[in-house]
Image (cartoon, coloured by chain):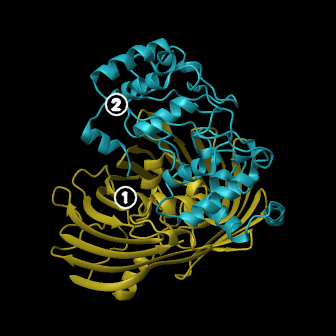
Chain colours: A cyan, B yellow
Amino acid sequence: MLWIATLLAELAVDPAAGALYQRACGACHGDQGDGRGEAARHLDPLPQDFARGVFKLRSTPTGSLPNDEDLRRTVREGVPGTAMPAFRDRLSAGQIAMMVQVAKRFAPRFAEERPEASIPIPSEPPDDAGSRKIGATLYRRYGCVECHGPSGRGDGPAAAGLRDDKGIPIRAYDFTRPGRMKGGHRPADVYRTLATGMDGTPMPSYRDSVPAEDLWHLVHHVRSLVRRRPFWDWLVNRP
Amino acid sequence: MRALLAAVLAMPAAAVPRFAARTALPCSACHVNPSGAGMRSRYGRDVFARTELVAHASPQAYALDPRIGERIALGADLRFALLHQRRDAPAGTPLQEPSLLREASQDTTFFPMQVDLYTAAELHEHLLFYADIAVSGSFETFAMLRALPLHGFVKAGMFVPVYGTRLADHTAAIRERLGFDPRNKDAGVEMGVEPGPLTLQVALHNGEPSGSAQDTVAGKLVTARAELRVALGPLRLRPGGSALYVTEGDDADLRYGPFLWAGLGRITYLGEVGLRERAGRTLYVFYHELALLVLRGHEVFATLEFLDPDIDVADGEATYRTGGGLEIFPVPFGELSVLYRHYFAHQGRGEDGVDEILGLVHVYF
């Protein structure tokens, strides 16, 4: 595949970084970063198409590119509930940074624009019964229930018709399942996801429509929906 | 005795269907051969073997690049074993043929169970050449065209006919006694499609597997295999079935049976039933395996097998084999395992009182 070497040369990618990208990422994301690696057809959801320049997991406002740390975090932590593994123990910090640079080269947007500043995450108020109760009210008021359902199982009235921006059917997240939030399950991770939205999916950004205090109430509510069944959770979640 | 042991246990390319059951991926996701076994695909080698399978991750996981240029990839499997066997009763009908211990009561030996070297060359975007050369002298080679609709393929060459669950353990009765152990390669063509969650394969072979001393069929051999992959919440199910038909003179040889693979998080189940109708006799075998992924890269498993050479003989011989063991993948491309197995006769008639302990070092890429 001479064209791959040519492509990497055109993109001015360090040959070592390019070769590592092919080994660590190419099978799924494709050697051109178009999400069409040889394993892609077996995977659900499909691997990220870097070339499109649309990224779900960011700390930046909706519509913006992610910054380098956002991309490094995704490589480091993986994407729970998908085939994307966590590379934190498999690639060094330097190698992860190299992979991010290679992935960015595939998206012309990174050459044309700069990521906006990260959305600030204010200090978390106490996660208590009062906050969760307010969050439950807001969950209905802001329409979360339409997709995620009244009990958070991802079975709201609109859930069946959800599609991403490529027209592929997708599922609303089931908050009752622990540890599978794509953007991370810690309070700050959930806040960030609510604030930024997930570009390319029907999950909108609530940064401009919901006050920060209410976002925290929502975070506390949706995190309280998790049904903890220790043995079952251990059994059904592969290590 | 040692020579017989080594010959019987020489085990060419093998697969681990348990991984497929757990991940709900088809065999073609992790193996170059869509029927499974042998050389790993790019995903199997670069993703699954370096991440999900391994107990202890390391930044060295991606140091190896077993490719020559962009279009040729190399691979290998080495399984080196220590086997101890003991018999404390007269020999009955063996679960595998020939039986390991027809004459001796006890034996312990080291032996290279499998040494296979693979190469795959991508001649064109849709055309692949594959060769698997085993030190035992067995070989598998085919050219594969991957340009049919529905992710279809056609391959032509010398390979194991597609059938059932392609277990790593070639001594399993559902493989060896049905004629599908990894040594039973035969010249032929195979076609398959993968429309969504369905995999359909059909193959036509000469019917004279060169690696088998057991096979006596002379007519053309047809095999077919179908599987469906379905998910019910966290439960992944893969029901399927296989069949083989070949004529030999006036006799027909029919082998068939269903299988079911299931995965629920850390638990996997593999089950297959097989029947072989030939010359007025019906052989019956089954295989059940239950495995638990205790920690990443640490798996315990138990098996139960059964062989009845002729189900129409009411008081004939039949044999069970139970087993259990531990598999550990401590580093990328390395595996250690230990297995204990015990044979006992059904209603006192059959192979009985045989114990086996197998320790295994497996390196692969």
One can see residue B80 in this view: yes
User: How many angstroms separate mark 2 from mark 1 (CA)?
Assistant: 24 Å
Label 1 is found on which chain of the structure?
B
The residue under label 1 is: B296
User: What amino acid is labelled 1 in the image?
Assistant: Arg
Q: Is residue B102 left or right of residue A102?
A: left
Q: Position of residue A48 (x, y in %)?
A: 64, 44
In this view, the residue farthest toward the bottom is B2
**Helix, strand or loop at disc 1?**
loop
Q: Residue at x 64, y 29 (%)?
A: A164
Q: Is residue B266 left or right of residue A60?
A: left
Label 2 is found on which chain of the structure?
A
One can see residue B104 in this view: no
Q: Position of residue B134 (x, y in %)?
A: 56, 78
Above or below, A61 against B154 in this view is: above
Closer to us: A103 or A43: A103
